[in-house]
Image: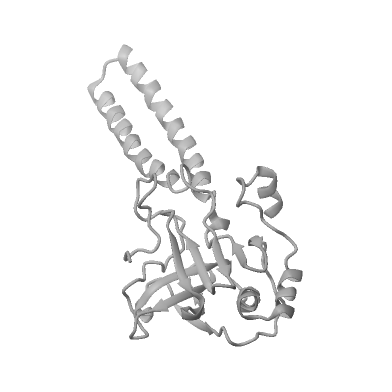
């Protein structure tokens, strides 16, 4: 398995490490204690029933008695790269227009120093647009949905990464914990080598929160109870779902995006 769980190989991209992605994924082959970006861990137990409300947090994409599919960890950050890209592109185009205007003035007013400054600025703008295009490539010309699917019949977890490949995990082999990272907190699932310390796989559940662990536990219990619960608990999970995010069939519409915000 690659040393980078989240990479950009296999799709249109100009950068290997896409921006706006959660840190801490570059963990394969490392001891969990040495993984950068994770400052604190709170263990979560799969065989323990947490007495908390079940909160799906508007992450459910598909639900039935066989599998539960949710959005990926970075779903709520989608659009960041495009938003910043449009802003930076507007600034860049404005500066470029100024440079072009300056060059046109040079044609009628020859000045070697003035020309040199304009050429340097133009070259700088070309260099500035390269990372901008690289940033936009992380969200454009690629899939719009990277789901996580929990199959309670086969006890498998399927995680679609940015390289369009699907990683398959055995639910029983996963270890869960709340990860404290720089920006907020999320729920990580990890598999280990035979030594019980070296990471062989890692992914994060969809919901993140920067204030309360209880809300994360409520989300974890929603997933845990679906995979571990009996028919009565499955009914409780179903009743907790009040919203299905239907992006497995089509792209999110602007109206849907506005409502979710």
Could you say where residue 235 lies in the image, as x and y percent from the top left?
74, 74
- Residue furthest out toward the left: 112
Residue 223, given in percent of the width and then of the height, sits at 62, 73
**Camera-side residue of 61 and 176:** 61
The quadrant holding residue 134 is: top left
Q: Which is more toward the observer, 62 or 122?
A: 62
Which residue is located at x 61 percent, y 80 percent?
Answer: 228
Locate the C terminus by quadrant: bottom right
Residue 188 lies left or right of residue 50; in this view the side is: left
User: Residue sitting at 66 percent across and 49 percent down?
Assistant: 257
Position of residue 29 relative to residue 2, above or below, is: below
Q: Residue at x 44, y 76 (%)?
A: 190
Where residue 92 sits, quadrant-wise, is top left
Residue, x 62% and y 51% (percent of image)? 247
Q: Position of residue 90 (x, y in %)?
A: 49, 35
Above-or-below relation of 62 to 204: above
Q: How many marks?
A: 0
Q: Quadrant of the N terminus?
A: bottom left
Give left or right: position of 24 versus 259.
left
Q: Position of residue 181 (x, y in %)?
A: 47, 71
Whether residue 128 is situated above or below residue 112 in the rendered picture: below
Q: How is the image coloured?
A: one colour
Q: Residue furthest top?
A: 108
Give the residue furthest to the bottom.
48
């Amino acid at each position: 398995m690659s040393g980078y769980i989240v990479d950009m190989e296999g799709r249109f991209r100009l950068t290997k490490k896409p921006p706006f992605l959660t840190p801490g994924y570059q963990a394969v082959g490392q001891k969990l204690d040495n993984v950068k970006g994770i400052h604190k861990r709170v263990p979560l137990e799969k065989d323990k029933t947490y007495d908390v409300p079940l909160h799906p947090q508007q992450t459910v994409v598909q639900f039935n008695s066989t599998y539960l599919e949710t959005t990926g960890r970075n779903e709520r950050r989608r659009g960041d790269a495009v938003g910043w890209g449009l802003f930076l592109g507007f600034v860049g185009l404005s500066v470029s227009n100024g440079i072009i205007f300056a060059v046109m003035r040079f044609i009628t007013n020859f000045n070697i120093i003035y020309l040199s400054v304009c050429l340097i600025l133009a070259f700088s703008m070309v260099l500035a647009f390269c990372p901008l295009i690289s940033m936009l490539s992380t969200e454009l010309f690629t899939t719009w949905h990277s789901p996580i699917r929990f199959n309670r019949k086969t006890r498998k977890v399927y995680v679609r990464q940015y390289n369009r490949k699907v990683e398959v995990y055995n639910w029983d082999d996963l270890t869960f914990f709340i990860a404290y990272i720089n920006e907020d907190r999320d729920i990580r699932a990890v598999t280990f080598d035979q030594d019980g310390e070296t990471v062989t796989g890692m992914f994060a559940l969809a919901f993140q929160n920067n204030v309360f662990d209880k809300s994360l536990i409520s989300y974890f219990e929603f997933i845990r109870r679906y995979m571990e619960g009996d028919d009565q608990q499955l009914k409780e999970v179903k009743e907790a779902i009040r919203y299905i995010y239907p992006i497995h069939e089509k792209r999110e519409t602007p109206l849907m995006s506005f409502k979710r915000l």
